[in-house]
Image: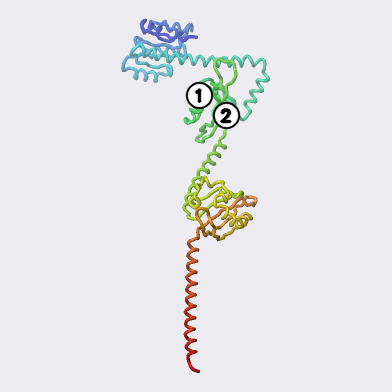
Amino acid sequence: MSSRISLLSTGEELLTYLNTNLSAGVFLEHNTKPQYLYHRLESTIGKPDIIVLGLEVEDPIRTAEHILVLQRDIKIIMLCRDGRQNMLQKAIQFSPFLNSDVTSFEYNNYASLRKKLQFLVDNVEKQRLYQSAIEVVEKERTAIAPTRPVMANYLDKLLDRIPLGIINLDSHGRILNLNRSAHEIMGKSERSLVNKALSTLFSDEDTDNIQRLLHHAITNEEKQGAIVASLNHFDVTAYIELSASLLSINTAEPIVTVIMQEVTARVLEEMKRKKAEKALQASEKQLRLVIDAIPELIAYVDADLAYQFNNKAFEKWFGFSRHEIKGKKIWQVIGELPYSIITPYIKEVMSGNTITFEEKLNYPYRGNVFIRSSYVPNFSESGRVIGFFLLTSDITQSKNEEEIKLQHMLEAAHASRIISIGEMSTQLAHEISQPL
């Protein structure tokens, strides 16, 4: 069905221009007097979709009111001269008989009016297709109902009782119908939801995701997983999971079925978990900074005797990066000879005992080093040893100082003994030299 535009007192020249430049299929007619237009509207033959009131119409407000009394659902454009649009628009707003389908238009040239009319024609065509789709659906439902009343009644009751919300949308994302669970989830009546765009019912941040979900369902370009959108219920945010699929039905335009369920508890728990993870990561980062600042060697070894953690001092000591150390066995890092010496201590800690020891070890590339180490076992919940922590200090300098101090003490003792022997020898010689 083509769109019909009726011109009132606009002149034959404009009619000719629009006939030439509007899209094909648009029917135009011109009326020189309002009475001719009223007569056509009263007869309901060839009802126009759009009426243009020309500059020569004496009282455009009253004319528009009369038109809408005779026929509703007609879009009316009032042409006006420069500077009169605001005044005319206010008059439209204050009129109790006019609605948003009535607008004023500042008429400058044919091209601007053609563009405006083409836009309205396109909208009329879209609305007509939408209405046709609804009529087809209703017709099919009406045709099926007498033949399968029991099954239809059963399915309707089933859809109303399942805990999932089910919504059917047209290709523009507007709601055609929905089950009881859907309007309970949305927190609104079915009447207030029908013909509303689904994306407008959720938060603005979710609009693009919802439109993308519906687009993928209609075009079937790629599989789109479920999304979660937020919905405000009396200042309380609820989270709804949405999935969409194309309903296979022979209609004038595609129908999309959306399945929804409330997942507020799950989303809040996930938010709580992520917040805890973030706090834990911050705590671990701070702990890592503290551990890396400690000059002693710190590491953790698992039950397979492989390093899983170490600090900066450990890396500098052995000349490996953290990445190179992780997962390596003890002997692969410290060397076979040092490992053979500390093996008894490793067995001791893996048996569940905390141990501290001192040893002189010959490390590759470091030579002989005196170390003091503490090994602390790590237990699982069942009490099994699953690894151990180690803290190792280089005590070579203190050991050397102890040896030097001991050497000094030995030398002093030796000197003291020499002096004592000398004194004793002198006294003995003196006594021997005396006559009896």
Whole-percent x and y of residue 175? 54, 23
Question: Residue drawn 57% across and 37% down?
Answer: 266
Which residue appears farthest toward the bottom when viewing the image? 436
Q: Is residue 164 visible?
A: yes
Cα–Cα span, label 2 and label 1: 15 Å
Q: Callout 1: few (<14), some (14-19), or many (20+) C-alpha neighbours within 10 Å?
A: some
Label 1 SS: loop
Give the residue number, with chain letter if any, for mark 1. 197
Q: Callout 2: few (<14), some (14-19), or many (20+) C-alpha neighbours within 10 Å?
A: many
Q: Give amino acid for label 1.
A: Ala
Relative to residue 262, is residue 312 depicted above or below? below
Name the side, left or right, on which 172 lies relative to 6.
Answer: right
Count of labels in the image: 2
Label 2 SS: strand
Whole-percent x and y of residue 103? 40, 17
On residue 158, which mark appears?
Answer: none
Give the residue number, with chain letter if any, for mark 2. 260
- 415 and 339: which is toward the camera: 415
- 361 and 326: which is toward the camera: 361
Question: Residue drawn 48% across and 87% down?
Answer: 429
Question: Residue drawn 48% across and 67% down?
Answer: 404
Q: Give amino acid for label 2.
A: Met
Whole-percent x and y of residue 27? 44, 7
Q: Is residue 191 visible?
A: no
Whole-percent x and y of residue 33? 38, 6
Sequence-wise first label, 2 or 1: 1
Name the side, left or right, on which 232 lies relative to 108.
Answer: right
Relative to residue 205, is residue 137 depicted above or below? above
Which residue appears farthest toward the right when viewing the image? 150
Name the side, left or right, on which 79 lies relative to 292.
Answer: left
